[in-house]
Amino acid sequence: MASVTVPNTVEQPVVESAFFNDVVNGLGRPNKSLPCKYFYDERGSQLFDQICDLDEYYLTRTEQAIMDQYADQMAAQLGERAMLVEFGSGSSTKTHVLLENLIQPSAYVPLDISEEHLLKTASALRLKFPHIEVLPVVADFTRDFALPVPQIEASHAAVYFPGSTIGNFETAAAQELLKNIANLLGAEGGLLVGIDLKKDPAIIHAAYNDSRNVTDEFNLNILRRINQELDADFDIDAFEHSAVYDQDEGRVEISLVSRCEQTVNLAEHTFQFFSGEEIFTEYSHKYSVDEFARLATTAGFSLHKHWTDSENLFAVLHLVNESD
């Protein structure tokens, strides 16, 4: 990720050809897959907000409770006049309490791939926090992007990466992303990151297989988006949601399963599916605090402080870039 700055608000729409190429490449593999970042168009973002309110989905309310209880300590760790950059900001719900506690923040930079959802959220935040400059960036945080220049000079940048989104990346990809964050922050830059902790598999299973089937709709929405934006002809009803927790790997494996033998067309490409064939859409890795701290050291981060809930379901970690 580049640390180059550009004037004021930056809006960098994801290039549609990248979406097309990612879909074609993913469906062309022997083990078909689709990048989970494409869940988040406007409808996908709204569905994910609904998931966060589900009884079974402990992650959001638990992380929010940690933020509510310890945001003042987190803000103190991040330091004065920080420019807070949030990866995958979505509705920025958990960020409110952090913004309320930051010490003379330079600016808040919500970064998300879903432009319409992001800009609506940014407008609402400007009304609630008129003393904080809100500079939305429409971008994919796994690719190069530029940071805006705030009106008040920042003493340093700090990245906030909530929601256990880091768990969506396999180990090598997570290491690469952490290295990119370290480069973006520079020496002594801070990372505040949420991770989902290892726990009773039944609790994890229920979180990804809710009784109202909202998660099913969220997973299937990626096929709707491909149909709408890339003019494919997926039969949505011919696929079903699957989410299985692999305790040995410490991750939930999420996929869309073909209900029958079928053919899907996308431009000049044709993809064959056999009955029961899967399209992997997302992993959600679970960690212990020590496991994640060891992973972060490979990118030059060291763990300075962490906070958990009383049941040890979730944790928020503050890591500092101590690489040269």
Image (tube, rainbow, N blue to C red):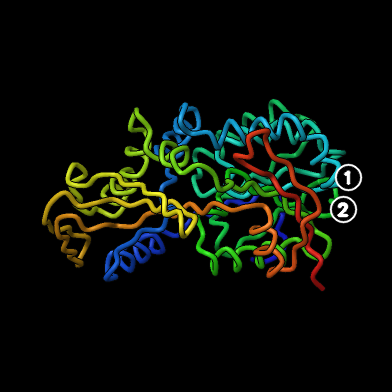
Residue at image coords 65%, 58%: 292
Residue 141 x %, y %: 57, 57
Query: Viewer-proximal residue, 293 or 256?
Result: 293
Q: Considering the numbered disc 1 on the image, is that residue within a helix, a strand or a loop?
A: loop
Q: Amino acid at mark 2?
A: Ser
Q: Residue at x 49, y 45 (%)?
A: 114
- Residue under label 2: 155
Determine contact: label 1, label 2, CB under 8 Å: yes
Where residue 267 sits in the image (x, y, percent)?
21, 62
- The residue to which callout 1 is attached is 80
In this rendered view, identify the residue nearer to me: 207 or 10: 207
Quadrant of the snapshot with the N terminus: bottom right
Under circle 2, the secondary element is loop
Identify the residue at the far left of this view.
Answer: 261
Left or right? Give the position of 214 relative to 291: left
Q: Tag 2 or tag 1, which sits nearer the N-term?
A: 1
Amino acid type of disc 1? Glu
Mark-to-mark CA distance, 1 and 2: 7 Å
Residue depicted at 74% across the width and 36% down the height: 98
Q: In front here: 88 or 138?
A: 88
